[in-house]
Amino acid sequence: MTSATPGTRPAGHDPHRPARARPGPAPSLPSPEAAARILRALREYPCWSVFWDKHLGVWRAAEDDPDSGLYTECSDADTVIGYIRAHA
């Protein structure tokens, strides 16, 4: 029977490579209805970009003007649409 001495590492271990993280929760997706509402709003306001951040579960919206600071993020599509309408 063999025993490992304290502090030994398995063969092929690279101390400079980070250990793999455990799988986290599955990314969230917006409802198809919410995505459809966002799409309709973008047809009305083509100078805005919106995407779903699947890791945080929020919509991110920004005006396409590089000099603009208009930006919002929210998990509720109607709140994002309201922000766009208020600032368009």
Image: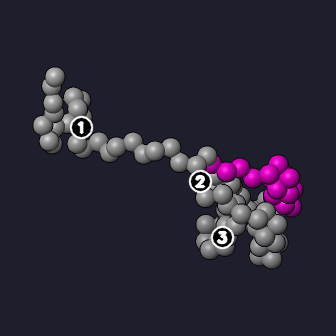
Q: In the figure, 82 relative to 34: above or below?
A: below
Q: Amino acid at mark 1?
A: Asp
Residue under label 3? 71
Instruction: Classify residue 31 as left or right of residue 13.
Output: right
Task: Give how far apart the Cα atoms at labels 1 and 3 are.
Answer: 42 Å
Q: In the figure, 46 relative to 25: above or below?
A: below
Task: Give how far apart the Cα atoms at labels 1 and 2 are.
Answer: 29 Å
Span shown in magenta? 27-44
Q: Earlier in the sequence, mark 3 or mark 2?
A: 2
Q: Quadrant of residue 44?
A: bottom right
Q: Give the x, y percent position of residue 43.
A: 85, 56
Residue at image point 75% right, 53% down: 30
Instruction: Classify residue 78 as left or right of residue 59.
Output: right
Q: Quadrant of residue 37?
A: bottom right
Q: Amino acid at mark 2?
A: His
Task: Give how far apart the Cα atoms at labels 3 and 2 are.
Answer: 18 Å
Residue under label 2? 55
Residue 39 visible (yes or no): no
Residue under label 1? 14
Q: Amino acid at mark 3?
A: Tyr
Between residue 78 and residue 51, name the one nearer to us: 78
Image quarter hosting the N terminus:
top left
Main SS category, magenta section: helix
Residue at image point 71% right, 50% down: 29
